[in-house]
Image (cartoon, rainbow, N blue to C red):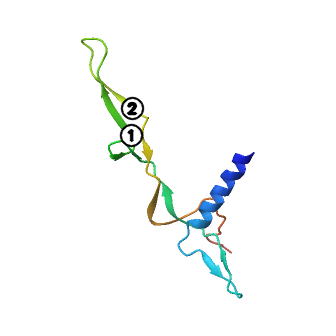
């Protein structure tokens, strides 16, 4: 149950912190956070390997055990670091934020 709550809090915290200038000031001078419908960063799908190269997938050439067999490519899944958050070229709308785009009469 604790992981569900922390996942929900993480999503809410991400949505509240992704805005550029998302602080509003009320009459008494206190600042309060306001959620924004825009997303300026996204999680990258690329990884760094141990040499510092950046790619979506990494392969290594494996020597066969038996004589007369061909070398083959094996996908590397260990010792890879995700790139993390990357900036978007322009802001996108958050899919979890309810916003009316157009109201037709």
Q: Residue at x 60, y 59 (%)?
A: 95
Secondary structure of the residue carrying numbered label 1: loop
N-term mark: 2 or 1: 1
Q: Which residue lies furthest to the left in this view?
A: 68
Query: In the figure, residue 93 lies in which quadrant?
Result: bottom right
Q: What numbered label is drawn on residue 22?
A: none
Quadrant of the drawing holding the C terminus: bottom right
Find disc 2 in the rendering and name its residue.
75
- Alpha-carbon span between mark 2 and mark 1: 7 Å
Within 10 Å of disc 1 (Cα), the crowding (few <14, some 14-19, many 20+) is: some
- The answer to which image quadrant residue 102 occupies is bottom right
Task: Tell me the element at label 2.
Answer: strand
How far across and down, in percent of the image, does residue 87 sit?
45, 62
63 relative position to 56: left or right: left
Residue 88: image location, x then y, percent: 45, 62
- 35 or 78, which is in the foreground? 78
At label 2, counting other C-alpha atoms closer than 10 Å, the crowd grade (few under 14, some 14-19, many 20 or more) is few
Where is residue 9 drawn, in percent x and y?
68, 57
Q: Name the residue under label 1.
A: 57
State the residue in front, 31 or 44.
31
């Amino acid at each position: 149950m604790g992981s569900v709550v922390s996942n929900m809090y993480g999503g809410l915290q991400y949505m509240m912190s992704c805005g550029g200038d998302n602080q509003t000031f009320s009459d008494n001078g206190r600042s309060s956070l306001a959620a924004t419908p825009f997303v300026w960063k996204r999680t990258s799908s690329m990884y760094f390997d141990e040499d510092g190269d950046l790619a979506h997938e990494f392969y290594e050439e494996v020597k066969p055990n038996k004589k007369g067999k061909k070398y083959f490519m094996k996908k590397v899944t260990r010792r890879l670091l995700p790139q993390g958050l990357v900036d978007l070229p322009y802001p996108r709308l958050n899919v979890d934020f309810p916003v009316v785009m157009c109201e037709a009469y």
